[in-house]
Amino acid sequence: MDNNFLSAEYIELQHTAIKKLILDQRLNEAISLLAPLVETIAQAELQYKLDEIRFSYTSMLQYMQKGVEDPERHSLYMKLLAETLEINDRMKISQLANYKYNSYYRLKAAYSNSHNNKNLEIIKTELETWCIDSNLDIKDNSFESDQIRKRHEDILAEMFTYIYLNTHWDKTDKLAADSFLKTSNVAGNDLCLMVSAVTMSLLICFDSLKMKWLLDAYLHTSTNVNQRALVGIAFNIHLYEERMHLYPEIIAQVNILNEMPEFGKELNRMHIQWLFCQETEKIDKKMREEIIPEMIKNATQNLDLPLDETDDDNEDKNPDWNNNKKQSDFEDMMREVGELQQEGADVYMSSFSQLKRYPFFEVLSNWFYPFDKQHSMVVNVLQEGTDPKNIVNLILDSTIFCDSDKYSLCFTLQHVPESQRQQMLSQLTEQQLNDFTDDMQILSAKKGDTQPNIVCRQYLHSLYRFFKLHQSRKEFPTIFDGRINIHRYHTLRDVLYKEEYLLPLANYYFSKEHFDKAAEVYSEIIGLAKGKADLFEKLGFCFQKQKEYDKAIEAYLKADMIHSDNVWTMRHLATCYRITKNYSNALSYYKKVESVLTENPNVTYYIGVCLAELKKYDEAINYFFKLDFMGSASIKSWRAIAWCSLANDKLEQAVIYYEKVLTMEPNYKDYLNAGHAYLCTKKIDQALSQYNKAYSTINSKERFIELFYQDKELLLKNGIHENDIPLLIDLL
């Protein structure tokens, strides 16, 4: 490990330690540590600012000591904490710039050495001039047109770099940035890129003026702009929530936005879409391996009783929660993929992950630029084929792929002759072609390209590719990893901590089987409002899936109080009571379920199990005979009858039913228990034969002996002498 890296690592640790002191409101200590560090970087502005903070804080403390009342004291203190945090951030950036230990600082050094005198006002003027003067047609591929396009792209790259590297805006920068939002002469795509540049710059170093600008950008009339701003706001509140309380003006701006009904709705939708991105790796694995887990059938085969003790904890969710038809078979796989896509899932990440190595993606700003058919690297791909059903146009005009993937697709097709592209089109099925065409028509009719949910989803997918695939991805915050709980943040609590927003969030976690997170949010909803039966049902189901059965029972009981005699709830209560070995309560609820589902094999079976556990063998056998009469799972009913007969001194009946079990597909317990039945009826040779089969199946002498001795009391009860047991084992 080289010294530069160690120094850089030390700088990071130092920055974190000082930040903690400031957030813990130990300002004097923080200033004492910062002062000598600021002197070393020789930046007069930071030195002056820190001296000003120290003077103001010292004066404030002196006035306080003298007993002077100051209603603005707390506000001033918050301001001093915020300013000290910003100095600490800027100092870290300045120190690390000397080491150039990652791409950001290398870019910063290169940009600084270029002596570029441009600022945001100049860049804005250039973009406005281009927007007014440009009147390019997509078929115009002249050299002059190409040069104009490239000049525009150079300006955009310059704008992105200027904002990205400028860690601290002054008032002049903020005024210039504000003017971008007010002009109609900067192209929409260009403004979208600016929003991304501000977002990325904030992820490197917090700047309250940039954060305020993003909040203003959300008010822009362009959906493409305001949805990008929304993502930037959420990302940076997520990253910097611990310091947001120090900026009352930012909190005030959020509260003003909260007066707009769509803000909370869109932020909550974006939150769920963001969470959905965390499912991408799981979806990728499913796509690659084409696996849809099969339902486990006949899971109730290995009982410790030795009745079948496998629980029915895998019962389906309450059908009342969702009226959609459940998909589970392999033949429904493509339909499931389509449904995932409809939900907003990122199903194409794996397909495009290897297509981000084109020169286009070597320019940082290009990762964030909306897809543009006029881009100089795209125009040539589209110059051939004006047929609206041209495969390239069909795909690029659809909402299926995000901007980043559309660029990848173009560059891939660039190497495919037009004749082969048309051949690809001819290979599409009529249905696939219609799907693309329908998507285009919907897009045109409903202006789908400006629908907030589509814009936001596609932007998140493009960002996901950047943060997961860019060559410098490890240098950026892991914005798509870890817990994302923006509804709990103080800054957004008044916006999102409402039942109308928490419920979709809880249901999302529930649908993705994140039962721990779903349980947390359902509990919060119940705490906010009077709990409804379905909320307690889902909460109980979440606890049951986490094997927290006592909590599940508590929730189910509350659901049962609100909506009594609900079969689904009673059945799950019975299951939880049975698993926790409260067989009496389990039996009570199974009996209630039985009064409604009179001929349900599963219910009949588990009533028998509970009765057997309560040692009511005669009643239990009657239920197992009933199960056998139903013709359901014959081996299961025979096994249960055999065991209860053995436990209830009906040895000949036990032998008869174990012999029936042995004609099916017996397991090691069947062999062992059949051996017991033969032994108790004095059929020693047959008993030894079954014990040998059990021993061979288990393939472990120690384990066999352990299992044999677990049934010792049963054998003694049926007349086997204790001294004979070790002899029997030695006969094997």
Image: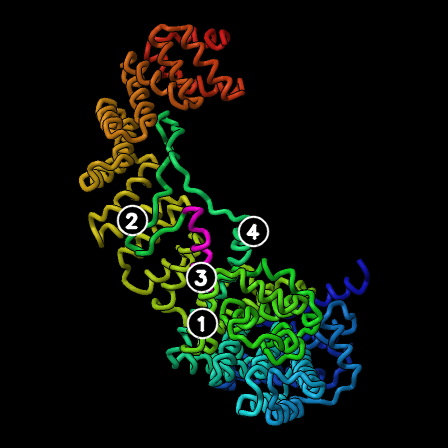
Q: Is residue 687 magenta?
A: no
Badge 1 vs badge 3, beta-carbon distance below 8 Å: no
- Earlier residue among tags 3 and 2: 3
Give the image location of residue 15, x and y in percent.
Answer: 67, 69
Which residue does the image show at 29% across and 56% down from the upper left? 534
- Earlier residue among tags 1 and 3: 3
Question: Label 3 belongs to which residue?
Answer: 431
- Earlier residue among tags 4 and 1: 4
- For this view, does 359 lie left or right of residue 240? right
User: Mark 1: which amino acid?
Assistant: Asn
Q: CA distance from mark 4 to mark 1?
A: 27 Å
Give the image location of residue 553, x and y in percent.
Answer: 31, 46
Q: CA distance from mark 1 to mark 2?
A: 36 Å
- Earlier residue among tags 4 and 2: 4
Give the image location of residue 115, x and y in percent.
Answer: 78, 86
Residue 453: image tag = 1
Badge 4 vs badge 3, beta-carbon distance below 8 Å: no
- Earlier residue among tags 1 and 2: 1
User: Mark 2: which amino acid?
Assistant: Tyr
